[in-house]
Image: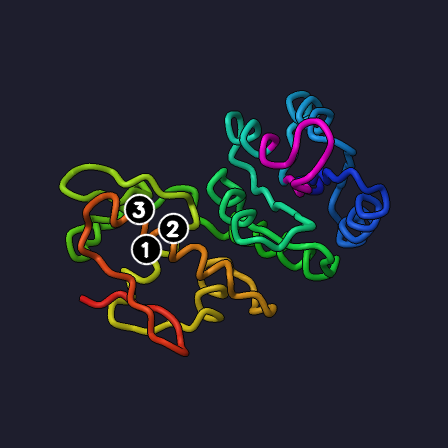
Amino acid sequence: MGSRLIYVVDDELNIRELVRSYLLKEGYDAETFADGDSALKHFRERPADMLITDIMMPGMDGYSLCKEIRKISDIPIIMVSAKDDEIDRIVGLELGSDDYISKPFSPKELVVRVKTIFRRIKDKPEKQEKPANEIKCHDLVIFPEERKVAKDGREIELTAKEYDFLLYLARNKNRVFTREQLISGIWGYDYMGDTRSVDDLVKRIRKKLSEACSGLEITTVWGYGYKISE
């Protein structure tokens, strides 16, 4: 099996080359692009194993690139942004990105996230011998085998991370998790100082549960973290 191919998309040459050099040092194969249009064109000709893309770029921006890639592939996508706004993180995650990192960022931290995502993919069983039993959580039913959540037979549309979060808490009812524990358990990497991704995720899940008229509550334990009570 050859090296994992990673596309790095950023309109800043120094960032492209910096990230590329760190990835090459870790044994990955990396190609760089200055805009989303050229990255998408090359992806259709030679699909990559991961995409790391800036958000604000001339022409096709990172959001549009992520949206187009998701139409044809489920490869991991890490979005990078010079902004540190909550809305950027939310939009990126809603469009299907797997992770989000703000500029300025540590190339070493980015490499750790890349490794963690690939490790999670490698460790994930392609097929379970026996379908996992459905999990009943208040008025919801979670189907781990199909990665679906339903209320009264109607599916609630969740992003991959929203589903992972809900499943994680549902499997550990009445247990309180800190934001750091949730990052480690769901994102799969060690706590690196930014827990806002967890809070953003909870806001979005609560909104979707409310829209589905679900009575399930993700409880905030002030000064500590979150839990789901039975």
For the residue labelled by badge 3, is the local secondary structure a helix, a strand or a loop?
helix
Work out whether residue 129 can be spotted.
yes
Work out whether residue 131 can be spotted.
no
Q: CA distance from mark 1 to mark 2?
A: 15 Å
Task: Check contact, mark 1 vs mark 2: CB within 8 A.
Answer: no
Q: Amino acid at mark 2?
A: Arg
Crowdedness of circle 2 by 10 Å Cα count: few (<14), some, many (20+)? Answer: some
- Side (left or right) of 13 relative to 222: right
Query: In which quadrant of the rendered image does the C terminus lie?
Result: bottom left
Q: Amino acid at mark 1?
A: Leu
Q: Amino acid at mark 3?
A: Lys
Q: Position of residue 204 (x, y in %)?
A: 38, 50
For the residue labelled by badge 1, is the local secondary structure a helix, a strand or a loop?
helix
Tell me where the magenta segment starts and ends, as one range: 51-65
Q: Which mark is residue 204?
A: 2
Q: Position of residue 106 (x, y in %)?
A: 73, 61
Residue at image position (33%, 69%) is: 220
Crowdedness of circle 1 by 10 Å Cα count: few (<14), some, many (20+)? Answer: many
Residue at image position (68%, 21%) is: 45
- Side (left or right) of 37 relative to 93: right
Q: Position of residue 33 (x, y in %)?
A: 77, 33
Is residue 35 depicted above or below 189 in this figure?
above
Q: Which residue is mark 1?
A: 167
Q: Which residue is mark 3?
A: 208
Residue at image position (71%, 29%) is: 39
